[in-house]
Image: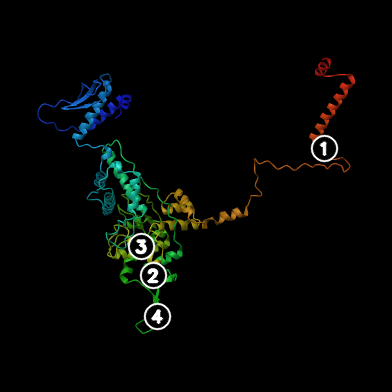
């Protein structure tokens, strides 16, 4: 520690040390008389100079401050710092830089634990959080806060993208590798854990977790032909990428005739995919997010939204939910065509005693979106992997823009802001710009428009040509040179007539 720095801010350091010491809990004292606290003593140095130096005496130990008695105020500051460090060691207190990362992760896991009466989806989210925190703990291990650097966070991203997706069971050969977006979500949870631990434990310092920039927004949306392929894949067909058509096979039927038919999935797979037809229909024609669709019911509830088939409304949020928490879930109208389709769904579900719109074949609700069903359907339909559940919402917004629907009405229907509709979804298509492009090409009204502030162009002046008999014009410089030569010649002739001679010449002749 540099004594000069202490001398410049001795009082500020003393106040900070005393404030920190006041926050440290008192430790239990032993029986007997209390020991003498550390204090300053004067001792002669053991070197050749034999100067008097101030020492910190703590029992039998003496620590030199390297300061003479004249600088006792600075030595008092060193003594206060020594007392604070000693008290922290005795109480097991560590500095902020030495806090284990595992302690912060465990602190966040305890703080996020839902209550017993919480809905099932809260417990599912807590399980997902536990999986992410376990992944972080596996990489960081025994690391402390000072080791959470930008380079270490980038190393975690490289390591995470080389591991299987944690949403799949360990050892699953079909599990894909984790993406950089998943690694970014893990680092976000690490940042939240460290900030929570530092806030609740009043740490004077904590590391800033590096978060990579989020990737560009998704621009993929579905065409009508792709939606039709998805619907046929839900019913069991398989798309052949080589022939760009549905797979067919030639078989012999029961009557002995050779027939060609489509290759179909087994009946059990088709039955499990039945829910995907509802998910695609709701996503395309209401623009509802997958999480809100999974919670939809046929009757009003406090936990999830509901569908009013008779009134043609979809309420995406339960009446017991706080509208300021999470993504916005506004209510909107549904079309008559979609309402008639949903009426058939409701009739069959009520006959089977099912309350949720999206449900498993046994009638139970889905605690999480059936990602495996979605991926299997997309593979059979020949759709690329960049099409996810949220692409349905993108498609609904893009179709509204292509149809030239009013921006305010389209935003209200999908439950989003006008700024989002214009800034993001309006950039995905050019089909809605036909009228603007035609108006720019025609230039209607431009010729008749009056422009203010632009000077009117002046006509060029008429310049008459010189007569044919005039001599050619001489350059002005030539004319001036002729005038100067003429003046010099006239002056010389005048001096010769009057007998004038310069003074220098007259003097030379006299000599």
Dot label at residue 259: 4
Q: What secondary structure is marked by label 4?
A: strand
User: How many marks can you see?
Assistant: 4
Q: What secondary structure is marked by label 2?
A: loop
Give the residue at mark 1: 474
Residue closest to the eye, 197 or 343:
197
Q: Quadrant of residue 245?
A: bottom left
Few, some or many residues within 10 Å of mark 2 (<14, 14–19, 20+):
many
CB within 8 Å, label 4 to label 3: no
Please tell me whether mark 2 or mark 1 is closer to you in this view: 1
> Which residue extends farthest left?
32
Q: What secondary structure is marked by label 3?
A: helix
CB within 8 Å, label 2 to label 1: no
Task: Mark 3 or mark 2: name the one nearer the start of the chain.
Answer: 2
Instruction: For marks 3 and 2, give the CA distance.
Output: 13 Å
> Which residue extends farthest bottom?
256
Residue closest to the eye, 43 or 297:
43
Dot label at residue 375: 3
Few, some or many residues within 10 Å of mark 4 (<14, 14–19, 20+):
few
Residue 149, percent from left and from top? 33, 43
Q: Is residue 313 visible?
A: yes
> Which residue extends farthest top?
510
Residue 216, percent from left and from top? 43, 52
Give the residue at mark 2: 238
């Amino acid at each position: 520690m540099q004594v000069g720095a202490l001398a410049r801010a001795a009082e500020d350091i003393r106040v900070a040390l005393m404030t920190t010491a006041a926050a440290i809990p008192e430790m239990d004292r032993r029986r007997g008389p209390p020991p003498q606290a550390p204090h300053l003593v004067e001792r002669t140095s053991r070197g050749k100079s034999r100067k008097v130096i101030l020492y910190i005496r703590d029992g039998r130990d003496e620590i030199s401050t390297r300061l003479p008695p004249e600088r006792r105020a600075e030595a008092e500051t060193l003594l206060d710092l020594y007392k604070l460090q000693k008290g922290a060691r005795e109480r097991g207190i560590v500095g902020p830089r030495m806090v284990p990362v595992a302690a912060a992760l465990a602190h966040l896991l305890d703080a996020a634990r839902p209550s017993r009466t919480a809905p099932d989806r809260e417990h599912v989210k807590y399980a997902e959080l536990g999986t992410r925190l376990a992944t972080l703990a596996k990489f960081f291990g025994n690391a402390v806060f000072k080791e959470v650097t930008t380079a270490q966070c980038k190393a975690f991203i490289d390591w995470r993208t080389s591991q299987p997706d944690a949403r799949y069971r360990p050892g699953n050969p079909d599990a894909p590798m984790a993406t950089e977006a998943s690694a970014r979500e893990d680092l976000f949870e690490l940042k939240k854990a460290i900030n929570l631990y530092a806030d609740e434990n009043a740490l004077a310092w904590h590391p800033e977790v590096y978060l990579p920039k989020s990737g560009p927004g998704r621009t993929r949306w579905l065409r009508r032909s792709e939606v039709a392929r998805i619907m046929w894949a839900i019913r069991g067909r398989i798309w052949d990428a080589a022939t760009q058509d549905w797979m067919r096979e030639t078989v012999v039927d029961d009557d002995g005739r050779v027939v060609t038919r489509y290759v179909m999935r087994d009946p059990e797979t088709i039955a499990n995919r039945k829910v995907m037809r509802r998910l695609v229909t709701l996503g395309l024609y209401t623009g509802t997010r997958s999480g809100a669709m999974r919670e939809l019911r046929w009757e009003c509830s406090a936990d999830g939204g509901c569908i009013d088939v008779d009134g043609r409304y979809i309420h995406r949020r339960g009446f017991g939910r706080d509208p300021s928490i999470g993504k916005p879930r506004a209510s909107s109208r549904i079309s008559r065509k979609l309402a008639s389709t949903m009426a058939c769904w409701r009739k069959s579900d009520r006959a089977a005693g099912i309350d949720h719109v999206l449900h498993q074949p046994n009638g139970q609700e889905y605690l999480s979106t059936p990602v495996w069903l979605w991926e299997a359907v997309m593979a059979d339909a020949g759709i690329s992997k960049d099409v996810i559940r949220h692409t349905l919402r993108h498609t609904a917004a893009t179709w509204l823009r292509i149809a030239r629907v009013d921006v305010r009405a389209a935003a209200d229907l999908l439950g989003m802001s006008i700024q989002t509709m214009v800034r993001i979804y309006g950039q995905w298509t050019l089909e809605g710009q036909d009228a603007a492009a035609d108006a720019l090409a025609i230039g209607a009204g431009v010729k008749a428009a009056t422009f203010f502030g632009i000077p009117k162009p002046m006509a060029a002046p008429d310049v008459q040509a010189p007569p044919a008999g005039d001599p050619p014009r001489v350059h002005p410089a030539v004319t001036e040179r002729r005038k100067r030569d003429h003046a010099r010649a006239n002056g010389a002739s005048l001096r010769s007539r009057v007998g004038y001679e310069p003074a220098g010449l007259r003097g030379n002749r006299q000599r």
